[in-house]
Image (cartoon, grey):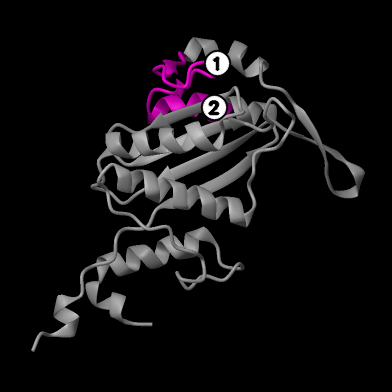
Amino acid sequence: MSDETGDTAPAPPEVLVRVQTISDFKAFKRHLRQMFDQGQPRYADFFDADAEPWNLWLGMVADFAEGWRLIGTEGQNGHRLSVIAMTLTFSMPTGTDAGVNEAAVLAVASKAFVGHQRVWVAGEHESPFVKMLVEYRDEDGRAVPSGPADLRRYREAYARELGVRGVAAQATTRGSRGLGFGETRKIYKARQRLNDASPAASGRN
């Protein structure tokens, strides 16, 4: 008879996706410049989906940033908020092929943000972490979908594109990870680090 615990295959690694709005214009330019610290920011050709993405150079940031539209949305107490862009981060555990990971994210972007003329992507050369800046509204004035259901959809698409490229991954929910909506991402990552440091900890509740 086989030992059930010994035959259990490890679960595929979990994809992580984070979404954040950017309302301050200086913060937006700072995010765009910081993409160069991570890797070469690339911009998909809106008119030719099959074309190679073209590169952004640091000296182009100031002029390029001026072209992003400031979108007014109604905030609390009647104040107007200028939402410029969404920043999305996609990451996998260390050891995942960085090139394959970036290709998977580019595939997600090409399908999820097809109506957005400004989508910049930068992936790290040494690690599977990709940052994306997306213009907040598309050409028809619709905002980037960013609710809980949309976040699940991004995770599922990310895991699916990795799988197409031979990398096993899973898109889990907060509930399946033992997270309530009141717990922060930092708590979850601290729990992950603890489990990584102590293999025996993974068997405890």
Q: Nearer the viewer, residue 4 or 179?
A: 4
Query: Residue 96 in magenta?
Result: no
Q: Is residue 110 placed above or below 174 in the rendered structure?
A: above
Disc assigned to residue 178: none
Q: Secondary structure at mark 1?
A: helix
Give coordinates of residue 67: x percent, y percent. Answer: 66, 16
Query: Residue 33 in magenta?
Result: yes
**What residue is rendered at 51% in x and 24% in y?**
33
Q: Quadrant of residue 122?
A: top left
Where's the N terminus, which quadrant? Answer: bottom left
Residue type, label 1 = Val
Q: Residue furthest bottom?
A: 1
Disc assigned to residue 61: 1
Give coordinates of residue 160: x percent, y percent. Answer: 38, 49
Q: Is residue 171 placed above or below 105 in the rendered structure?
A: below
143 sits to left or right of 153 = right
Give coordinates of residue 95: x percent, y percent. Answer: 23, 47
Q: Secondary structure at mark 2?
A: strand
- The residue segment tinted magenta is 30-57
Residue type, label 2 = Val
Q: Nearer the viewer, mark 1 or mark 2?
A: 2
Disc assigned to residue 119: 2
Q: Quadrant of residue 123?
A: top left
**What residue is rendered at 90% in x and 48% in y?**
77
Q: Is residue 194 placed above or below 119 in the rendered structure?
A: below
Q: Nearer the viewer, residue 44 or 70?
A: 44
